Image (tube, helix red, strand yellow):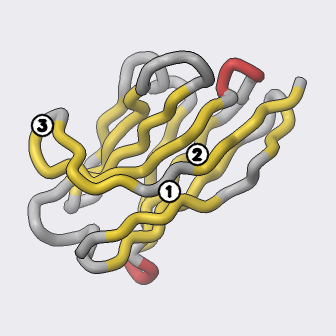
Amino acid sequence: QVQLQESGPGLVISSHTLTLTCTVSGGSITTGYYGWSWIRQPPGKGLEWIGDISYTGETYYSPSFKSRASLSRDTSNNQFILHLSNVTPEDTAMYFCARLSAPSRNDYWGQGTQVTVSS
């Protein structure tokens, strides 16, 4: 059973960089032809895809976040990481990590972590 757990600060100051880590258990992030996604949901809005990192380490970003987002991974700890720079209060959201099993299909999700950006 694959499990994902997000971790990071609950509160970030405007203009700073948000860093979130997703720790994966029950499967390796470097095998199985899977991708690994970051997705967020602002209050009262729908899900927003931020980006993916493949099992080979290739990265793919939503045009909405490409200028500010950076995905990386720590293979020794089976983690993948989101850096989102120059945050504003509009980046306040619940942030999720998920496994990408097919194009646009995330089959395992973390429980999410709430991030609030203060001005």
**Relative to the observer, which residue lies in front, 58 or 42?**
42
User: Which labelled disc corresponds to residue 103?
Assistant: 3
Q: Are marks 2 and 1 in contact (CB under 8 Å)?
A: yes
The image shows residue 83 at horizontal and vertical percentages of 58, 45
Q: Can you say which quadrant of the picture contains the C terminus?
A: top right
Residue picked out by circle 1? 81
Q: Position of residue 117 (x, y in %)?
A: 78, 32
Query: In terms of secondary structure, where does tag 2 sit?
Result: strand
Viewed as shown, does residue 118 lie left or right of 37?
right
User: Label 3 to label 1, Cα distance in Å?
Assistant: 20 Å
Q: Pick the residue in front: 74 or 37.
A: 37
Badge 1 density bin: few <14, some 14–19, many ≥20, Cα 10 Å: many
Residue appearing at x 52%, y 50% in the figure = 112
Q: How many labels does the image show?
A: 3
Check the image and report above or below for 1 versus 65.
below
The N terminus: image quadrant: bottom left
Which of the two discs, 2 and 3, labels the residue nearer the N terminus? 2
